[in-house]
Amino acid sequence: MTHIHIPDGVLPVWLWAAGWLLTLALLALASRFAGRAGSRRAVPLVGAVSALVLVAMSTEIVPIAYHINLTVIAGAFLGPWLGAISAFIVVLVLSLLGHGGVTVIGLNTLVIAAEMAVGWGLVRAGLRVFGARRTRAVAGVATVLTLALTTTMLVGIVALAGSPATERETGALDPDTLRFESPFSDGVVTLGLLSGGEHDEEHAAEEEHTLSVGRFAAVVYTLGPVGWLLEALVTAGVLGYVVGVRPRLVIAGVFAESRRTRYGDEHGGH
Amino acid sequence: MDVTAIDRSAVLGSSALHRATPASKLVAATLVIAGVVAANDPVALFGVLLALAGGAAALRLPLRSMWVLALYPALFALVFAFAAAPGAVTALLIVLKAVTAAFTVVTLMFTTPYPQVFAPIQRITPGIVGDALLMTYRSLFILAEKLADLTRAVRLRAGVSARQPLRSAKATTRALGGLLLYSFDLAQREYDILYLRGYEGGLRVTPRRSASPAADAGAVLAAALGLATIALFRALPSLAGYSWIAAVTGAVACAIGIMYGRRHR
């Protein structure tokens, strides 16, 4: 629930366009910093971890409309810069598979990149303070805190969408311009959804004119903790397993684990 | 999500849409999504969705797999609509927007091999992003298959049982942990391959030429027609009561598409 499952054409154009611009700036910055690790090393690693996150995200827990993200794990291993690249890739591929809108790719990237960066920071700091023996607890707490933060980001985005700035014609979903009338409503067909031509004004008066941020926040903060808990348990279980099998991978990081310098490749190859 | 079904259809398919250039299909998809963004009439949008489905049926695309993917976001859109929509009509429109946009991109992916879809994205993003994108899609197939194997193995060894949820959860997280380690090993192998091949950044994809200019024009025209329909109902509020015409036209197009597809199977 932390990334936006909002379809295209619901958020105002200025909001998702700003999301795209910020994401492009973030990607430019991230690729500059990520290049320091060597693109030859970074490309396959980002590819494999992004694919792992995609596999996890495509497995849905139907009753609560939740899927595991593994973004904190991805962030913990990739770090904030490679994490930002991975976030963009994950969101892009998901949207091409119909999961998430195309216009909200920018905003979704920002939310998931934040999730990976915060997850990385909290897991690294936690391991430094409490040591590898407490990996499970550190991972669980870091996941809950990260998801709570990014869920708040999500609510903030919807709040921005519901602000007076969106009430003008922006191309976004605007209940003021919503049309739903039937020429048959005078008596030929007056059932259910097809009725309404004569009631339009009443309905318009009844309906609010913006997205209900309060209700959205209430639903998200009610369903969210169930998801946070599940994600925290999975993250704790997975990192606990990895620290038991290959501790150096968690403690020193992926690059330290996989670094095998070859002749002529001392800098990882750019 | 069966990613192999998408790739199989994109690579092995031979419909008119498969013969069109990826560029024209991307333009067509963009036009339809612009229509989805602009749509403010659920009936007109439903008409466009029906027409799209009719087109896919006429081209004999794997509709069942496509609908599974296209309806998936409807579940999340329903939650969002329930949580944030100011009324039932808005909620219906939100769900229809999700399904129509998803069906559009899914149609694109079922008729276009992924490197061809990613090629234009590679041009506008930094090199490392474009290359990692191609690597991700390649790894996705490998990891999805590996996860299926791992899950099967865990189940065969009675690791997952409804009566013992704790043990099941442990086995599942261990399987995910195993998959994580496997993904690092996969990354290392891919790094070795890139090293051997002298990769210096910049995996290039050559854009495919059109095998059927008529298919290019048809795809773009059909998409433009859908966008025009939606724009018409948005621009002229006096037509609001006649959007049922768009829905009926879409339903007729859908029925004709299904019959055509069945006859030419």
Image (cartoon, rainbow, N blue to C red):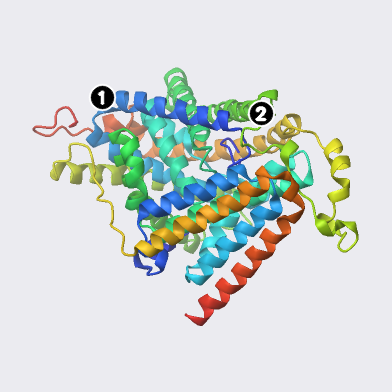
Mark 1 = which residue? A36
Chain holding disc 2? A
Mark 2 = which residue? A166
Left or right: B173 with respect to A171? Answer: left
What kind of element bears circle 2? helix
Residue A78: name its quadrant.
Answer: top left
B243 w.r.t. B61: above or below: above
- Going by the numbered disc 2, the residue's amino acid type is Thr
Left or right: B241 with respect to B193? Answer: right
Residue A143 appears at what percent x and percent y? 54, 31
Q: Is residue B168 visible?
A: no
Sequence-wise first label, 1 or 2: 1
Chain holding disc 1? A
Most foreground residue, A50 or B41: B41
What kind of element bears circle 1? helix
A81 w.r.t. B102: above or below: above
Q: Residue furthest top?
A: A129
